[in-house]
Image (cartoon, helix red, strand yellow):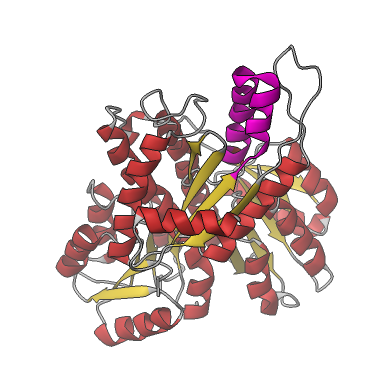
Amino acid sequence: MPHLAYILIGDPDPERALSRAEFLNAAGYRCIQASDAHTLIGLAGSRMPDVILMGQFSAPVDSLNIVRALKTADATQSIPIVLLDLPPQADLLTLVRDEDVDDILGPNDDNQELLLRLPRLTRSSVMQAELSRRIKTAADFGLTVDPKDFVRAYPVRPLVLAVAPDDASMIDLVEALNDGGFECVPETGYFRAADALDNGRFDAAVIMTASADDFERTQYLCGHIRHNPRLFNLPTLVLTAPATRDRAKDFYRGGAAIVLSGLSDADRLCTYIHMLVGRQRLRWTLRDPFKALLKDETADISGVAYSKDFWDAHLARTIETAQARNARLAMAYLSIPTLPRIKEEYGTENAEILAHQLADWITSMTRIEDTVARIGPDAFGILLPETPRAEANGVTQRIIGILHNSEFNLGEDVMQSVRAWAIGGATALEPEDTPETLMARAKSAAN
């Protein structure tokens, strides 16, 4: 059975590492352990895990030295690192942030907390791994892309929306954020906060709860962020009150990236936000090399989806990697019967105008790491790495529903708009699959 992610656990205490590995293995992850710095760094480079969990190593090679070595090596610099059992000391938190650690867990955080945070960390690895694969496939078509050539300039002080239930709570929250290096926009109304998010461009949101009554309002705002196509990746941190502390799991399920207990430790709060913003900015920056891979050499005639030739080559490479790592992979198949009808009634040019719009819409409704290709005159394929079949099918049905309820314009000679009828389905990679068998099953699921 495919695993959720490949985890490297580094801990000087082998028994503690084994215990954590057994817990994560039972939850669907695949883990390997290392109990010394040399082995940890070696395994990181040779096994390329999705996430590295690191306990507290001491001299002569302490945890920060290991982090520095991993983050400066080309092979491992993109792997998310989580420091475990980190004491909440202000100077230590600053050092951790400066070394680009991706997440931290304190001595009082348990394995359940780790389990709730891992999905967002593995998402970063999925993007990086897919970018590397796609670069290799593009190179086979004569297109060279180097991610290091793409740099975005971001404001030094990230813009954060601070949401608190009352003015008294807001004063403390704003002070902590301003002192922590952020530009802060305060809002005490949850519905107004949703409007501010819709109309602004924030780097993160911090939502504070003060009583049990705030639970529903906070869940509403988290849900608003999660279900908005423009906002769903926005880093969201929730500060719980005693009355809502036992609802942390619900906040995570609702879309929060991090849940902390109150505002008792401003340094820890700001360290977390800087980490979340750093991960988010990395994802934004990665979009640029992804887009650079869609050029004449790799794209279909529309220029906004990959070609059938690229799809065939990339599908084979992705299947090989997924099977070698026992990773999840899903494929969706979309057939658009409207396209041949438009070609028959209005000509090839109008059919291609519609196909261009459909490719653009389908691409916009998938993740940047999902490969969207036009694999036939009236068909699109979507390759979704690290995605279960049920989730891929949900994506497919959402795309179909939106296409059915949208109107598309054709050329100037066609005065009326049209709706695109689509049928589709999704399947998941099986151990003995080939590109042909996976594609056949995806087509069958569409019918």
Q: Residue 193, position in %: x, y?
A: 78, 48
Q: Position of residue 76 (x, y in %)?
A: 26, 53
Residue at the extreme front of the image, as rendered: 344
Q: Is 349 within the magenta? A: yes
Instruction: Look at the image and tell me in which quarter the N terminus lies.
Output: bottom left
Tell me which corner region of the image, top left, top right, bottom left or bottom right, holds residue 37.
Answer: bottom left
Q: Is residue 159 above or below residue 60?
A: above
- 176 relative position to 428: left or right: right
Q: Is residue 149 above or below residue 245?
A: above
Q: Nearer the viewer, residue 189 or 174?
A: 189
**Can you see residue 198?**
yes
Residue 35 shown left or right of residue 371 in the figure: left
Q: Nearer the viewer, residue 9 or 60?
A: 9
Q: What residue appears at the point 70 percent right and 51 percent down from the top-left corner?
A: 225
Image quadrant where one finds the C terminus: bottom right
Q: Nearer the viewer, residue 401 or 42?
A: 401
Q: Is residue 246 magenta?
A: no
Of residue 170 and residue 399, the one placed in the foreground of this image is: 399
Tell me if residue 378 comes above or below residue 389 in the rendering: above
Dominant SS of magenta comes to helix
Q: How many marks?
A: 0
Point 26% across, 76% down: residue? 33
Image quadrant of residue 132? top left
In percent of the image, x 40 and y 41: which residue is there? 311
Residue stretch in magenta: 335-363
Residue 363 percent coordinates (x, y): 56, 39
Residue lying farthest to the top in this orientation? 413
Q: Is the residue 60 above or below the residue 415 in the image?
A: below
Can the viewer see residue 257? Answer: no
- The percent coordinates of residue 146 (x first, y second) are 30, 32
Q: Is residue 221 left or right of residue 289?
A: right
